[in-house]
Amino acid sequence: MNGRTPAKLRLDVATIGVLTALLIMLWALTAQAATAFTGDKIQGLPVITQLDVNDLEPGKTQRFMFQGVEMGSGEFWYVPVIVAKERSQESGSCWCRGYMETS
């Protein structure tokens, strides 16, 4: 006997099932990764909710406003983001920086 009660064994099976479902959902989200534009512009910059650097042109610096979480007032947080993708396709590296200004 391993000393576990039947209730504890059920919890372990349920936990494994939930973790497996979460891993599958995360895999599905990464498989569908693409830059998602809202269609809005703030201070002349396109607003995005998701960024895939593979969608960006190499050797150029891109500027976006990232739409974050929704506040209790119904308004969203917006964060300016600058992305500089390297010209070389071999390295596949990208330099990203986000900053937030407060007034």
Image (spheres, rainbow, N blue to C red):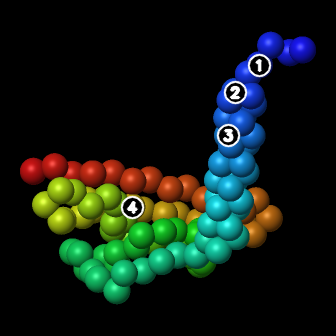
Q: Is residue 18 above or below residue 84?
A: above
In this figure, which residue is indicated by the disc labeled 3? Answer: 15
Amino acid on which disc 2 is placed: Lys
Which one is earlier in the sequence, the residue at label 3 or at label 2?
2
Q: Please tell me in which quadrant of the rendered image residue 63 appears.
A: bottom left
Q: How many marks?
A: 4
Question: Helix, strand, or loop for circle 4?
Answer: strand
Comparing labels 1 and 4, the label whose residue is closer to the camera: 1
In this figure, which residue is indicated by the disc labeled 4? Answer: 81
How far apart in space, not on screen, are marks 4 and 3 (Cα)?
37 Å
Which one is earlier in the sequence, the residue at label 2 or at label 4?
2
How far apart in space, not on screen, are marks 2 and 4 (Cα)?
47 Å
How far apart in space, not on screen, are marks 1 and 4 (Cα)?
51 Å
Marks 3 and 2 in Cβ contact (< 8 Å) = no
Question: Helix, strand, or loop for circle 3?
Answer: helix
Which one is earlier in the sequence, the residue at label 1 or at label 4?
1
In this figure, which residue is indicated by the disc labeled 2? Answer: 8
6 or 25, nearer to the observer: 6
85 or 68, nearer to the observer: 68
Q: Is residue 43 left or right of residue 1?
A: left
Which one is earlier in the sequence, the residue at label 4 or at label 3?
3
In the rendered view of the protein, which quadrant contains the N terminus?
top right
